[in-house]
Amino acid sequence: MRRSVLPILAAALLGGCFYADDPLISRRAADFPLAEGRYSHTPYHPDGRPFDRATWTGEIEREGWSYASDEEAFPHQHVRLRELTDGLYAAQRENDGNYLFGLVFTYPGGIVTYHNPSCSDLSESARDRYALSVDMEEGTCLIDRWDVLEAVLLTYLDEQNGAPRVDGVYRRLD
């Protein structure tokens, strides 16, 4: 069953994203709001329903300037975070030579939710304001500077009324 879940997770983590050719969250700018420890991960279906069980459980540790796990199939290996506002972070993850960006929300008690924003969900006026063009085949937008990424993510969040859909949850177990 675990193998059938991995393609769904990969699609959820990659679809319609904001990306860069180079890292926009540098080592010096990285923040580490998550306590190291044992976590479970439950992804959500595109319609907003959580999976009926956790699809991954393991130790998450700070490794250098990112988070990592020695456990197999950790969905967010080497993610790097940078605070946008209190409890809200931009997340950066490398994939096939590009850097993908998402939103991470931290809550008391070791609960973390994430959302993978879609460039096509950003209003046309906002894309024009930040000079972003959507790759029509992939549905992605290239961003090449941190200040633009920060502004785009905050605008995106505002356009989602501060509450975008949840794409997954991590819960601290210890």
Image (tube, rainbow, N blue to C red):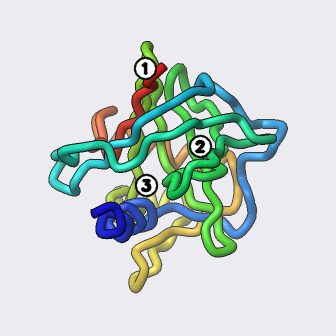
Mark 1 or mark 3: whose residue is earlier in sequence: 1
- Residue 53 percent across, percent down from the top left: 24, 43
- The residue indicated by pointer 1 is 107
| Quadrant of the rendered image containing residue 119 | bottom left
Task: Give the secondary structure at mark 3.
Answer: helix
The spot of residue 81 in percent (x, y) is 63, 39
Residue at image point 69% right, 73% down: 97
What label sits on residue 54 in the rendered view? none
Amino acid type of the residue that numbered disc 2 sits on in the rendered structure: Glu
Q: How many other residues sit within 10 Å of disc 3, few (<14), some (14-19) or many (≥20)?
A: some
> On the image, numbered disc 3 is attached to which residue?
126
Say whether residue 24 is left or right of residue 112.
right
* Mark 2, secondary structure of its residue: helix
Q: Compared with residue 7, is residue 32 higher up or lower down, i.e. above or below? A: above
Instruction: Look at the numbered disc 1 and give the secondary structure of its residue.
Output: strand
Say which label, 1 or 2, has the lower sequence index.
Answer: 1
Foreground disc of the pair 1, 3? 1
The picture places residue 65, in percent across and down from the top left corner, at 78, 41
Instruction: Classify the position of the N terminus by image quarter.
Output: bottom left
Q: Nearer the viewer, mark 1 or mark 2?
A: 1
In this orientation, which residue lies closer to the viewer: 135 or 25?
A: 25
Question: Badge 1: few (under 14), some or many (20 or more) residues near its Cα, within 10 Å?
Answer: few
- Label 1, label 2: how many angstroms apart (C-alpha)? 21 Å
Checking the image for residue 150, the label placed there is 2
- Measured in 3D between alpha carbons, the distance from the residue under mark 1 to the one under mark 3, in whole angstroms, is 29 Å
On the picture, is 24 further left or further right than 58? right
